[in-house]
Amino acid sequence: MALTATTAAQKMHSIKGDRHLFSSSDDSIVLKQMHETHKPEGRDIDVRPILRVVEDVFRRTTPTFVVTQLMSQTHLEADVRDGANQTGLILMLEAIAFTVHRISYEVTYKCSSGGEAHTTTMAVFHVLSTYTWDAKAVMALAALAVNYGEFWLTAQLHTVNPLAKSLALLKQVPDIIEHANVLKPRFDAINNLIRVMLDVTKCIIEFTELPSEYISPESPEMGTAMTHIPTAVYWVVRGVVACISQTIALIGIGHEYISSTTEAWELSTIAHKLANIHGHLTKQLELCHKHIEEKMHHEAYQTLVRLFETIHIDNMKILRALFYSKDDLPLFDGFTKKRASLDVLRRKIVMLFISDLDIRHEELFVLVQIYNDTHHGKAERQYEVVWLPVTDRHHPWTENREADFNRLVSNMPWYTLQHPSLLQPPVIRYIRDVWHFDKKPILVVLDPQGKVVCPNAIHMIWIWGSLAYPFTSSREEALWKEETWKLELLVDEIDPVILSWIREGQHICLYGGDDIEWIRKFTKLLRQVAHDAKVPIEMVYVGKSNPKGVKKATAVIKAENLSNYWEDPAIIWFFWVRLESMWHSKMQRGRSIEDDPIMQEVMQMLSFDGSDEGWAVISHSSYDILKSHGKTLYDCLLNFDTWKENVELEGFIPALAKALLPYHTHEHCTRLILPGDTQQIKEKVICAQCKRPMEKYVLYRCCKD
């Protein structure tokens, strides 16, 4: 008993004497001592497999394992064969076996003789002087695994194996199972420390495995980590010394000392120190990964830029770069409802439909209609459409977003990307920076060699539909050369009835706005004026681009039978999006209001939509078109008696145009709201009414209803 008490007193003195080393202010002293022993010889040791064996030993030495899973010798041998039967690992273990044994002996001897913990720790560093920091930590843990594993192997088998029983007697290993409850706090502290040591060691190894081509030791993120790693390794080795010391303390100390919690204090203190170090290293590792990710993304982005600047024999390199995936079937065919490889797009015109998950119902509906009108079967397809869903990676991918994605895919008859995650960040950056995707969907057209032949064909699609094939910028230029400002361009095939009225020579009035009172007064007055002028006229309400208020106005028009109207909101949306597309298409062609008559007309229509009052376009035949703000036109119609005699001489439209001249004033406020493509809008925009430069403002609008 005297020996036991002396040993305990020595250990307590050692703990108290080393308390100052737990102060971070003295870490620099320890660091200096460690660097004096650090003389690596460039030995290449793959520490990962060794650490896996070490982890396996620790996993099988937990108290829970001992109490509930006493394994047979045969079973243990089988597991060892399965885990270590690798030539490289065996050779590596053979190379370090002597050093590991020497560490175990060194620590066991010094702890048994009451040596100071710090001195013992530095002795280990002298043994490991020629190894790298990560190897030092792993080999120290291997020494602990040998020591701790032998202890538990004897404890586990001493009741069933005669050799283990004899060894237990010689080592005076206490009956661990019998005193499991009393010893539990101590072993919990040991296991917690082992867990933290493993966490820190794995973190250190991760730093050594970072790709040097993307991050160098001189980089700030890596440099900071490198200053902390030696300290981290010190406390791992210090923890190994403490754990082996605990094992030794259990040998021959007597049951009186078993319940002591003094040693558990040292273990928990080191564990706390290592946990703090692990937190710092983990944060630094995250910064390193972020740095590497940014460098890799930049490299991938530059690769993408070079690919699009290079001539290719087909489009496969481009498509593989865009749809990076280890999956051989990254596409989903909306026609067959089956997955597909990129080969289905080889040497074809590919239209990349790029959007987020918030696509307007009307937008998708009209696009599908145009697509189906020209594709009755796969054999007739002259091009392929692929949807690229651009999602915000900073927002978690929830079940609701997954449902939105699947719903959109089910409504698309073309190819779609199998999942948004296949669109990598560098590709998304390219889409935003080079193709100017922001919120509004775009259609980027690639020719059979993968060359971009139109940065955004969505405007062509809205204006001319399938007539825009093959959707190149040169085709867009050719189509505009054939166009003049006429009612057919304004309404196209949105409403076939209007086209029939044009052929019949009818007078047609398209009007909009959401001022109910003005609509009531205007429609009744125009109908009366047309009757008095003996001019048959058809009126159609076309609403506004902003659907707010349009539904209410349409309901009043329908209930009071004020005029014709478009009941389907998709038609009203399409009317206005075509006008916006005309603007954007002209802007892409570098045209301006000063030199383009169609641009002038389109801008005036869009300015009508941006105002709070009503407006009207009155036409007779294709080219005889008159436009006016609602109040101006209404006032002029009220004075019909003053100019009605000109109707028979000049015609209704010319007479009305002449009568409107006195109503025009220099005082006006024209507002032009242009959604999307803001990067391509010129700084100077000329007013369609007075031809002076307009002031530019920023408008944020959210209209969901």
Image: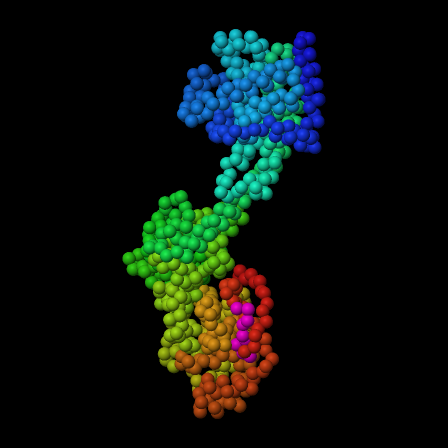
Residue 24: image quadrant is top right
Q: Is residue 260 visible?
A: no
Q: Identify the residue at image location x=36%, y=45%.
A: 328
Q: Nearer the viewer, residue 597 or 401?
A: 597
Q: Nearer the viewer, residue 367 or 161?
A: 161
Question: Taking 100 as reference, is 89 left or right?
Answer: left
Q: Residue furthest left?
A: 379
Q: Nearer the viewer, residue 352 or 610?
A: 352
Name the image quarter holding the N terminus: top right
Q: Identify the residue at image location x=38%, y=53%.
A: 415
Q: Position of residue 360 (x, y in %)?
A: 47, 59
Q: How is the image coloured?
A: rainbow
Q: Is residue 684 magenta?
A: yes
Question: Taking 499 as reference, is 143 left or right?
Answer: right
Location of residue 316 with respect to 104 vertically, above or below: below
Q: Position of residue 141 (x, y in %)?
A: 55, 24
Question: The magenta stretch spans which residues?
Answer: 682-690
Q: Is residue 672 visible?
A: yes
Q: Is residue 97 magenta?
A: no
Q: Nearer the viewer, residue 496 or 233?
A: 233
